[in-house]
Amino acid sequence: MVMSGRPGSDMGPPGASAALVDCGTAPPGPEATPVTEQEWLTCTDPTPMMELLEKKSSDRKFRLFAVACCRTVRHLLPDERCWNAVLVAERFADGQATDHDLAVADGVAVQFQEEAVSWVERLAAQTVGEATKCNSRFPARRVWERAALALEGEAVEQMAHREATGHVDEMMEAWLDAWLGSERAVGWTDSDPDGHLVSLLRCSFGNPFRSVIADPKWLTSTVIALAQGIYDDRAFHRLPILADALQDAGCDNTDVLDHCRSADPHVRGCWVIDLLLGKS
């Protein structure tokens, strides 16, 4: 069971390859408990947060969050065609791709899962495959689980090469055994992939305990043009400029302004941009 070898039926514990290929039959993670608002703001475990969101949010929001997860593993994808499948999923979320386009994208992801030459590569391809299926009924948690595992696997592999000369395969085998039972990142490195994905989750969904309604006076031509440009161009570096424009328009909502000025990562589907553009 070596990280650099091609995943196959002769590698890993019995059923390991099947567990990686058939994400739909993966064992469930630990049962989540409801989160409070304070926990939502400080939590680094997406599981209970996703439990809350799965009952409240739209297919579009989940699809765009899934795409954001895929962007974190883009450098691990085996082929540009796999990345193109992510872009199809993103266009589909905004009504710019068809069901057929999405099905083709899913087929591409499945092909690369089968052809992957390492476990990390396969997990990255699985992230894409889960994203092409994601909606409010097909839990987005499967996307971040795969993305978190791919990112942790990359970090463990790098650590193994630094610290376990001559024993890389053994370390990777132990890591694989550790996560197969739970389908969750196991915390062997300081990379904290779950923590990073939680920040994307908060950007996408905001604070579900506080409802923010856009005051019509905020929606000046300048604000709308800035918000649309940020959305279209992924120009999240312009968010502080948007905050200034909102203040000029009379916005004093600290949640909105602080989010625009936050140094945390931002994604397409950002709750403030969606609020201003009337997207749900």
Image: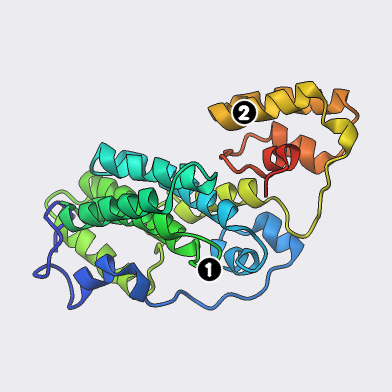
Badge 1 element: loop
In this rendering, would 105 be left or right of 211?
left
**First along the sequence among labels 1 and 2:** 1
Residue located at (59% from left, 38% from top): 266
Q: Amino acid at mark 1?
A: Arg
200 on left or right of 167: right
Q: Position of residue 219 (x, y in %)?
A: 82, 31
Callout 2 secondary element: helix
- Percent x, y of residue 208: 73, 58
Residue in the picture at 19% in, 53% down: 118
Q: How is the image coloured?
A: rainbow
Q: Residues within 10 Å of mark 2 (few under 14, many from 20)?
A: some
Percent position of residue 186, x then y: 39, 64
At label 2, the amino acid type is: Ile
Q: Vertically, is 214 above or below 59?
A: above
Residue identifier under label 2: 230
Q: What residue is pinned by disc 1?
A: 137
Relative to 190, 222 lies left or right: right
Identify which residue is drawn at 37% across, 52% down. Answer: 100
Quadrant into which the N terminus falls: bottom left
Residue 261 visible, this angle:
yes
